[in-house]
Amino acid sequence: MSCPRTLPPARARRWRARLAGAVAVLVATSGAVATTSAPATAASLSGNPLAGAAGFTVVSYGDAELSNHEIEGSVAVGGNVSVRTGQGPYNLIHRAAGNGDYVLPTLGGTPVRLVVGGFDRASSTQSVRVASGGYTDAATQLGRMTIGSTTGVGIAGRGAGVCVQASTTTDCSGPVIEQSAAPQTVAWTVQPTAFDTLVPTAARDTMAQWSQGIAEGRLVGAEAVTLGSTAQPMNGVDVTLVAGKVNVLRVAAADFPSTDWKLRFPTVKPSATTPLVIDVVAADGASVLLPMETIGAYDAPGGSSDNNFARYMLWNIDQAPGSTVYLSGNGIVPGSLLAPSSTVITGLSGPSDTSADKTLIEGQIVAASLLLRNSGEVHHYGYAASLEIGGGEGGFSLRKALSGIAAGDLPDGTSTQFSVDYFLDGATTKAGTLTLTADGTLVAGPQDLPVGTEVTFREATPSAPTGTVWTGVTFSPSTVEIADGDDVEVTVTNSYRAAVGGFRVAKALSGLTAADLPDGDDTEFAVDYFLDGSTTKAGTLVVTADGTPVAGPTSLPLGTVVTFGEPSAVAPTGRVWTGATISPSSVTITADGQSTLVTVTNSYRDAVGGFSLSKALDGIDAVDLPDGGATEFEVDYFLNG
């Protein structure tokens, strides 16, 4: 069994972007414009997700190109319709090979088979024939056509009905839209509001919400199923359904087989009580190869004219707005296609493909714009299962964590409180505040936030225990995107470090200038420093005579006492170093980031010397002198010559 690619569990934020303002509908460059406004929050829905299609087989909000074989059903186009097939007239009939057990939409009580905003006649190569062939009840199955704009065309009577033709043509020739089987007038044919009346904005909004809810995994009572082994795709790729559940197969486009394959339900089959929803996650321009056969689809009781599974299978095309998806395959695809924000191109695998695979679709199609380029047909099988989308609510919870300290280091220990604000969808005004405690207790935030809400957080700077510094807060995850039923746990981690400081040392001179020193300003002096009264130096800084401060260590804990000493100093010739004065004499680290400047001033004096004289007598003794040994003699001395 193959494993589908891992897909994001919640696509809320993407969908909020996709549906902000208006769901993208690729409208015609000319012709009617149909838009879909965005739901403000995820919607709760129940019923038929294609009810908004008003019973039409094909709905294109924008333009539609009809280049496949034919449609057994009805078509509503908000923009322009064109036909570019190389075969004969393009037929809209009631039934040939499909099942005709359906009734047409009605406009003012009148059955309609084709409703268009306009006719792109210049781009068309063939006619559209609204023939209603195969109907069995004229009151409900014989359809008319309407057009919203007559720009570039004229309308004339044709048979019982009308012909939309070139304004210069009177014989319904060339590319035209012809409805000649059912009675209608030219005046009634022009209905500028027909599309919006039958498929109004509210209906388009709702179908977009259905697609969104499926993509976000909000189907109530859903059972996830997987795509079986694709090793032998023509033998059948199994999808094992769970009876009585809404079975959801979420699969990336690239995980479908890349060659022809068949779909098989080995046990339980799709039914009204066991529908299958296939959420196809596709990038812009993705190619999806659809099954060429669903094994057992035409077994009894339906037989060859009734697909047993088509009414209970829904293909949800999960793309960003304005994206394009290519749907191809060489057989019959059961089920309806819901692609309200995509351009759907059938029968081709990509922009360079011209092969026009069969890709016969039995179901309904809803798309932003549509190009039917498959060689097969579209058969009406109205989606018939009832589904439910949950309103989509979720929430978050916060817990406090600490890094660098323990809760016991805080002023109130594990009971210390922290206030964390939370903000919704980018608002700068807080939506609320949660109070967390240092013991890590999980605190619940609101649990009723709509799916897709984006929650961010902020914590004011808390006080730090003495001797520590708060270095910031981290939120993991930093942003919460609300998913249905989730309670996302967010860890709010406060980080701390020890408060530390340091000092700087600069040299000053007294009694001389730096120019008197051997190396001038660059003369170096070694200054030792000692920590907390130790007699063993902790380190030495080398400072220069120019007075530039030199940083010592900056990571000394608060309370550290630093003292200094200069073991020796350089003295120039003729000078004597008389010692160093250190100011301040010691530094106590008292604040984080402290960098106290210590000035070590070296003092100098001139180097000096002298002489002494003594008297000696020759020929007499001191006693022979008048004052004896105390007799004084004056001796003059002279300096430098």
Image: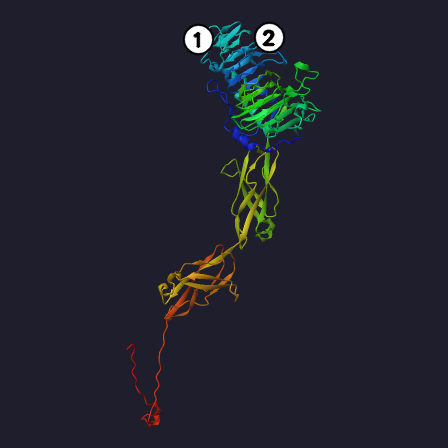
Can you say which quadrant of the picture contains the C terminus? Answer: bottom left
CB within 8 Å, label 1 to label 2:
no
Q: Is residue 309 left or right of residue 611?
A: right
Residue 584 visible in the current orientation:
no
Q: Which residue is the site of mark 2?
A: 138
Can you say which quadrant of the picture contains the N terminus? Answer: top right
Residue at position x 60%, y 50% from top?
414
Residue type for callout 2? Ala
Residue type for callout 1? Thr
Give the vertical position of 93 relative to 327 (above or below): above
Bin the neighbour count of mark 2 within 10 Å (Cα to Cα): few under 14, some 14-19, many 20 and up.
few
- How far apart marks 1 and 2 lie (CA) works out to 33 Å
Tell us which disc is closer to us: 1 or 2: 1
Residue 17 visible in the current orientation:
yes
Locate residue 289, reporting x and y percent: 60, 24
Direction left: furthest residue:
641
Q: Which residue is the site of mark 1?
A: 168
- Secondary element at tag 1: loop
Locate residue 424, reporting x and y percent: 53, 36
Nearest the eye: 369 or 594: 369
Give the vertical position of 533 relative to 130 (above or below): below
- Secondary element at tag 2: helix
Q: Is residue 629 left or right of residue 94?
A: left
Question: Which one is earlier in the sequence, the residue at label 1 or at label 2?
Answer: 2
Q: Is residue 419 left or right of residue 583?
A: right
Give the quadrant of residue 509.
Answer: bottom left
Locate residue 334, reporting x and y percent: 63, 20
Residue at position x 66%, y 14% from top?
305
Locate residue 459, reporting x and y percent: 53, 44
